[in-house]
Amino acid sequence: MQKGQTLVEYVLVLVLLMAAATAAGFIIKALNRQHHRTEVILGSHYP
């Protein structure tokens, strides 16, 4: 019984780490897109 519980805990931690990495990836992509939009807006005021 103990070995089965340990395996479940390892799988749960792995899934949570993958979810955290995915969320971090989405946040980084959103920040990069926002940075690009800000550069375009600020750059449009100059000739």
Image (cartoon, helix red, strand yellow):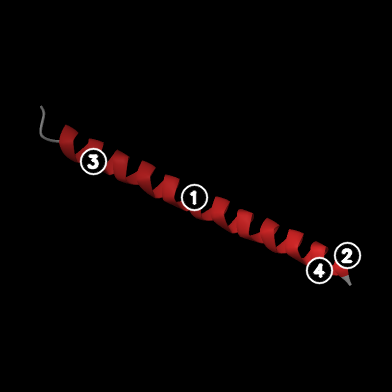
Name the foreground residue: 35 vs 3. Answer: 3
Q: CA distance from mark 1 to mark 2?
A: 32 Å
Provide the residue designation for mark 4. 5
Residue beneath the point at 58% across and 58% down: 19
Mark 4 or mark 3, which is nearer to you? 4
Mark 3 or mark 1, which is nearer to you? 1
Provide the residue designation for mark 3. 38
Asked whether disc 4 touches disc 2, contact meaning CB atoms under 8 Å apart, the reply is: yes
- The outermost residue toward the front is 2
Provide the residue designation for mark 2. 3
Q: CA distance from mark 3 to mark 1?
A: 21 Å
Badge 4 marks a residue whose secondary structure is helix
Name the amino acid, label 4.
Gln
Q: Is residue 19 above or below residue 30?
A: below
On the image, the x and y values in percent for residue 34 come to: 31, 45
Residue beneath the point at 47% across and 52% down: 26
Residue 24 is tagged as: 1
Badge 2 marks a residue whose secondary structure is helix
* Res 16 → quadrant: bottom right
Badge 1 marks a residue whose secondary structure is helix
N-term mark: 4 or 3: 4
Asked whether disc 3 touches disc 1, contact meaning CB atoms under 8 Å apart, the reply is: no
